[in-house]
Amino acid sequence: MRYYHFLLLVLISLVIACQTKETKNVEVNTETFMVDADSVAIDTLLISKNDTAFVIKPKVAKDSTLQDKKAFEINVLFSNKKWPALNFKQAIGADLYMVGDINGDNQPELLLRPEWFSSCWSSINLFSLKDNSWSLVKVGSMYFCADEYPLSKRIEKENSKYYLLTDSLADDKFVINKREIQF
């Protein structure tokens, strides 16, 4: 008898679910990446409440001969299928921060700090999504071993203008530079 009650409950749930479900056709462009698990690794980064980035990066062992290789590159894929993949050369990994829309085109901007073999100095790269591709808007340098200005604090708004905070050294002291972002 319990078996029939269970089947009846499943049938009623199915009927109700089918009647209230609204479907929409959404066009999605996807790119397929085949990865070799022996030569690449994948980092998963939560870049916003609803979006995830997957950084496909080369596996780097403690082998000093790997640095003799001429080119390393990463590919960043996004869970939001409307965003295209981002390819970045001369990196063995990346830290990302989704800035949001700062140029008013209803498309996101993204900060990327590439990882390399050593050193706390790195470039900081601001990308903007335009015409279904990521365009490099601004580049600077940053000292990422200090926690004073992580990626999330590298964009400042002042008098309706946006600035990228970059780092430099002057007389053995760190200097924070404000570089205006122009789209």
Image (tube, rainbow, N blue to C red):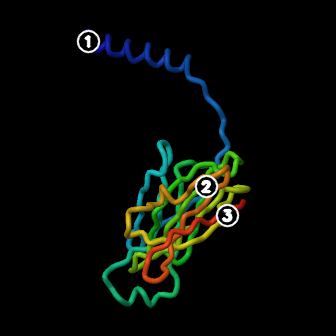
Give the distance between the C-alpha atoms of the residues marked 2 and 3, in whole angstroms. 9 Å
Mark 2 highlights which residue?
109
Relative to 75, does residue 98 appear above or below in the rendering?
above
Tell me the tag on residue 2: 1
Circle 2: residue type: Glu
Q: Which quadrant holds the C terminus? A: bottom right
SS class, disc 2: strand
| Residue drawn at (69%, 52%) of the image | 103
Is 6 left, or right, of 36 in this rendering? left
Dot 2 surroundings within 10 Å: few (below 14), some, or many (20 or more)? Answer: many
Q: Earlier in the sequence, mark 1 or mark 3?
A: 1
| Residue drawn at (66%, 35%) of the image | 25
Circle 1: residue type: Arg
Dot 3 surroundings within 10 Å: few (below 14), some, or many (20 or more)? Answer: some
Relative to 174, does residue 34 appear above or below in the rendering?
above
Residue 68 versus residue 142: which sits nearer the camera? 142
Mark 3 highlights which residue?
135
The image position of residue 74, as x and y in percent, is 51, 70
